[in-house]
Amino acid sequence: MALNAQILLSILAHESDNGDISQSLRATPATYALALTDGTGANQAQVVWSDAGTATLAGVTLSLTALPTVIEGAAATVNLSSGMKCIYLRNKGIQSIAISSANVSGLPSSGLSVRAGGAMVLVATTPSSYAATSLGPSITLAGNDVDYDIILIGEGTVT
């Protein structure tokens, strides 16, 4: 199964100033786009894993070497230990989600936090972007009854 992915981010902010007689409008646009093709080099990826999940007080730990999925009705396992090019997390809950990683380079060991209703996207283009640094790489999502969408795109295998 060949992979092609488009990662698009668009921000358009408008500010207006209502003076006594005149008005001014300031637009601030920003866009980011990345196309990933199938492979293991720069701007390439092989697999996608996604989940819309919830977790209790204990949170959830996602082992990057054994992410469960279903492909064409059959149970399968995604292994992303070779490296991730895109990490997307949307917090659909009312509590913050703390993200920490064990043995994944490029992610801060102190972790990140996505506030309630917020989202984060981390994108990199090189083969070693967010790669496993030793056996057992994982990402942990912790918080009180977290509700999330997550998408991981990277190099790896599906078995």
Image (tube, helix red, strand yellow):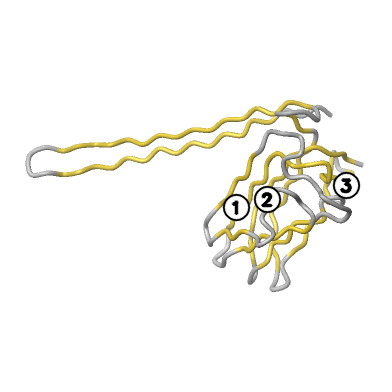
Residue under label 2, please give it.
150
Q: Residue at x 70, y 66 (%)?
A: 55
Tag 1–tag 3 contact (CB < 8 Å) = no
**In what quadrant of the picture does the C terminus appear?**
top right
Q: Horizontal and vertical percent for residue 151?
A: 69, 46
Between discs 3 and 2, the one toward the N terminus: 3
Q: Position of 127 compared to 124: left or right? A: right
Q: Horizontal and vertical percent for residue 14?
A: 32, 40
Q: Position of 21 compared to 35: left or right? A: left
**In what quadrant of the picture does the N terminus appear?**
top right
Q: Residue at x 69, y 53 (%)?
A: 52
With respect to residue 32, does 145 lie above or below?
Answer: below
Distance, label 3 to label 2, CA atoms, is 16 Å
Tag 2–tag 1 contact (CB < 8 Å) = yes
Mark identifier at residue 77: 3
With respect to residue 28, does 137 lie above or below?
Answer: below
Residue 46 lies in quadrant: top right
With respect to residue 23, does 1 lie above or below?
Answer: above
- Secondary structure beneath dot 2 equals strand
Q: Horizontal and vertical percent for residue 88?
A: 64, 47
- Secondary structure beneath dot 3 equals strand
Distance, label 1 to label 3, CA atoms, is 23 Å
Residue 23 lies in quadrant: top left
Mark identifier at residue 90: 1
Q: Mark 3 is on which residue type?
A: Thr
Q: Nearest the camera: 137 or 55?
A: 137
Q: Position of 58 compared to 33: left or right? A: right
Distance, label 2 to label 1, CA atoms, is 6 Å
Q: Mark 2 is on which residue type?
A: Ile
Mark 1, residues whose alpha carbon is within 10 Å: few (<14), some, or many (≥20)?
Answer: many
Q: Horizontal and vertical percent for residue 145?
A: 65, 69
Between discs 1 and 3, the one toward the N terminus: 3
